[in-house]
Image (tube, rainbow, N blue to C red):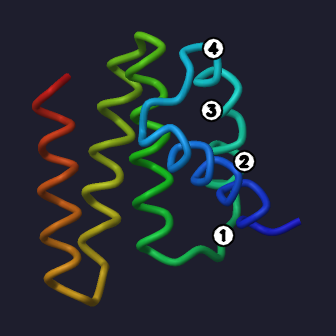
Amino acid sequence: MTVNNYTGPVEDLFSLYQGNIPENAYLKVIPWLEKALSFPRMSVQLRSRVLCLLGDCLKQTGDSVKAKQCYNQAFIVSAEIEDKQLMVQLQKMIQSRLSAL
């Protein structure tokens, strides 16, 4: 198994539902994202994205404390993205999600 075995289906699900997956799916997606984060070899960009998705899922399940932790961790990880424009764009998105908590 690779990290993409876990992230691919989740990303497809979020894309299919345009970021608003069915309410009962959030609890099912969380373990997949947590498993994906256990892989040590993952691009910085993908790790940031997975942390954001996990934060989104936790927020939807009412766990705003853990969601905030995920968003903060995503922000820190995203600072390592080499493409500075992409880094700034991702960090703005993360800040927006943090302010919405």
In the visual, does 22 lie left or right of 57?
Answer: right
| Label drawn at residue 24 | 4
* Of the pair 98 and 23, the residue shown nearer to us: 23
Q: CA distance from mark 3 to mark 1?
A: 18 Å
Picture coordinates of residue 85, whole percent (x, y): 14, 82
Going from N to C along the chain, the mark reached first, 2 or 4, is 4
Residue 10 at x, y = what percent? 63, 47
Q: Which label number is shown at residue 35?
A: 2
- Which callout, 2 or 3, points at the residue further toward the start of the chain? 3
Q: Amino acid at mark 2?
A: Lys
Q: Give the quarter of the image for residue 64.
A: top left
On the picture, is 22 further left or further right than 45?
right
Query: From mark 4 to mark 3, how far is it between C-alphas?
Result: 11 Å
Q: Earlier in the sequence, mark 1 or mark 4?
A: 4
Q: Nearer the viewer, mark 4 or mark 3?
A: 4
User: Is 67 left, or right, of 95 in this rendering?
Assistant: right
Question: Dot 1: few (<14), some (14–19), or many (≥20) neighbours within 10 Å?
Answer: few
Residue 36 x %, y %: 68, 54
SS for tag 3? helix
44 in relation to 23, above or below: below
Question: In the depicted view, which residue is nearer to us: 81 or 60?
Answer: 60
In the picture of the structure, the residue carrying the numbered disc 3 is 30
Tally of marks: 4
Check whether the beta carbons of the residues at disc 3 and disc 1 lie within 8 A of each other: no
Disc marking residue 40: 1
Query: Which residue is depicted at the point 35% across and 35% down?
Result: 69
- Graded by Cα atoms within 10 Å as few (under 14), some (14 to 19) or many (20 or more), the crowding at tag 2 reads few
Identity of the residue drawn at 12% across and 56% down: 92
Q: Spatial distance from mark 1 to mark 4, Cα to Cα?
A: 29 Å
Q: Amino acid at mark 3?
A: Ile
Q: CA distance from mark 2 to mark 4?
A: 19 Å
